[in-house]
Amino acid sequence: MAENNPAFERLEDQLAWYDTKSMENQKWYKRLKVAEIIAAAIIPFVAGFEGLGIITGILGVLIVVFIGIQSLNQYHDNWISYRSTAEKLKHEKYLWLSKAGPYKDAKNPEVTLAERVESLVSKEHAKWEATMEKTAKEQTK
């Protein structure tokens, strides 16, 4: 049933993409946050030593850079949004495979699947586009 079904293939493709991108964004977000926390924790320690003011300054600059990268690339927001979409696609996959929900009595379940998958992907794309526009406006201020 799932073999040679363009709608199911699209579902699988998009599920894999959103799952992978969610994990990548989660890793980058956590890496930057951990680096930020470590740098911030070291500052008071280093500040207690005479002659290490340059290191304190460098750590402060690194914190600003880490926050800037996170803000620019929106790792946290993307992680959450992509995970949400992946879970919705996973839910759709299980409904489809179980012939449940909207597929139970559908005259043409393949069309229903295609429409529902494209609706989910389209919503995610619209959210991404809105976020990019908002980020661009904030950067021009």
Image (spheres, helix red, strand yellow):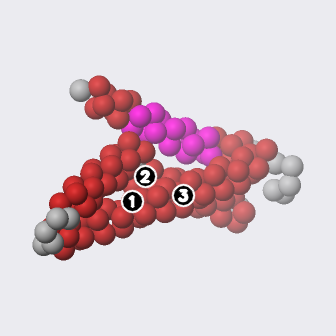
**Image quarter for residue 23?**
bottom right
73 relative to 54, above or below: above
In the rendered image of this protein, does residue 121 appear above or below residue 133?
A: below
Residue at horizontal 60 percent and vertical 57 percent from the top: 20
Magenta span includes 54: no
Magenta part, dominant SS = helix
Residue under pointer 2 = 75
1 sits to left or right of 16? right
Residues tagged 2 and 1 counted as in contact (Cβ below 8 A): yes
Please tell me whether mark 2 sits on a helix, a strand or a loop.
helix
Please state the horizontal and vertical placement of residue 66, each as a whole percent of the image: 34, 53
Q: Secondary structure at mark 3?
A: helix
Camera-near label (2 vs 1) is 1
Residue 73: image location, x then y, percent: 42, 45
Q: Is residue 1 above or below residue 74?
A: below
Report the side of 117 relative to 61 (left or right): right
The image quadrant where one finds the N terminus is bottom right
Q: Is 48 left or right of 141, judged from the image as shown?
A: left
Residue at 24% from the left image edge and 26% from the top image edge: 141
Per the image, the residue denoted by label 3 is 24
